[in-house]
Image (tube, rainbow, N blue to C red):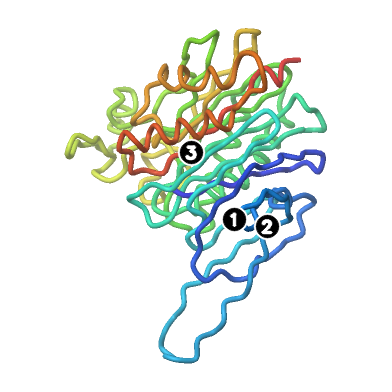
Amino acid sequence: MSCAIAAVSSPIFSPSPRKLSSIFSTPQPASLSSPPFSVLKHIRTPLNGGGKEVGPPKMSSALKRKRPANIDIPAMSFEFNNDMTTSKFGGPTEMEVEGEGYSVCCKRGRRGSAMEDRFAAVLDLQGDSKQAFFGIFDGHGGAGAAEFAANNLQKNVTNEISKRSEEQIEEAVKEGYLTTDSEFLREEIRGGTCCVTALIRKGDVVMSNAGDCRAVMCRGGVAEALTVDHKPSLHEERQRIENLGGYVDCSHGVWRVHGSLAVTRAIGDRHLKEWVIAEPATKVFKIRPDCEFLIMASDGLWDKVSNQEAVDLARPLCVGGGKPEVFSACKKLVDLSLTRGSTDDISVMIIQLTQFVQ
């Protein structure tokens, strides 16, 4: 599980990120693939304690050491691909972004050497400010699958939707997930990723997940879970795996597929692909006036914070008089999970649903 990256597919969108804090070792120059628009152009970086807004941070090349000659200096590179910032080695330890209608805060857990979480935020789909795609991707076994899904899932889902009628929206999302999974497996990259995504269009939210990333909506102050965690302890999932000739077992209180993976659905995980499927669970609901905001987060949050606790903490900052402080709500949720002992990567995104009411 790793840091997060925002996908922006429309040159109209200006996400106005709040802050990007990363810790690297001996960085190399960034590699650019000339996207039409880059999130890093709007980074605010304090200079000598000041608050002057500047462009993307300059990255200097690491000098090659001559003595001793046998030292191999670790390197890190960043590149832009499909309007996303992707880390090939390691990556940032945290990321904080405040965008139009959403905010996100991601932080590396204490038990990992690099963050494996990623996120995507794509606004102004088809030039419509009321259409958007959001996703949280919780990687395991490396960040490769999370990065790949954050880069490709939205376009695959959108492509499938264009082929079908409105009544087939759930099938289109399913095929988008499965296509992304197939494409990733051809890359021969290790690991996998859980996903939770929200496609907002025509006044509806198409909510999907594969794995244990979760979405919770605040409806008039009441927490409403919109997804179900796909874990081996879930009877339906355990039965599905056993019917396919697999097994699940419990070790130290944690149920795992073949004694290995603690989730039953994910993109990737080649060695368990027969049983760990990428097919998402999807539901569609209309955005009503009492649908206030949506919290999407990795299990780094939900393992320590209940659905209603998350809503109760975030609501005073997201709803009511004055300017909403959505980013502060994200950060408070991350900090709460940390104070309760979470060692996992934590990614929290809050979407203001009222921004997308038609």
Name, please, the residue furthest toward the front: 49
Residue at (81% x, 43% y) in the render: 11
**Separation of disc 1 and disc 2 at Cα?**
7 Å
Q: Residues within 10 Å of mark 3 (few under 14, many from 20)?
A: many
Q: Residue at x 45, y 30 (%)?
A: 333
Q: Label 3 belongs to which residue?
A: 347
Among the 4 quarters of the image, the one containing residue 294: top right
Is there a contact, CB below 8 Å, between mark 1 and mark 2? yes
Image x and y of residue 236, in percent: 33, 23
Give the mark nearest the N terminus, 3 or 2.
2
Residue 229 figure quarter: top left
Front one among 297 and 325: 325
Front tag of 3 and 2 = 3
Residue type for callout 2: Phe
Label 2 secondary element: strand
| Relative horizontal placement of residue 161, taking residue 2 as reference (left or right) | right
Establish if 285 lies above or below 243: above
Residue 86 is tagged as 1
Which residue is labeled 2 in the image?
A: 80
Q: Residue at x 56, y 69 (%)?
A: 27
The earlier-in-sequence mark between 1 and 2 is 2
CA separation, marks 3 and 2?
21 Å
Lateral position of residue 106 relative to residue 235, left or right: right
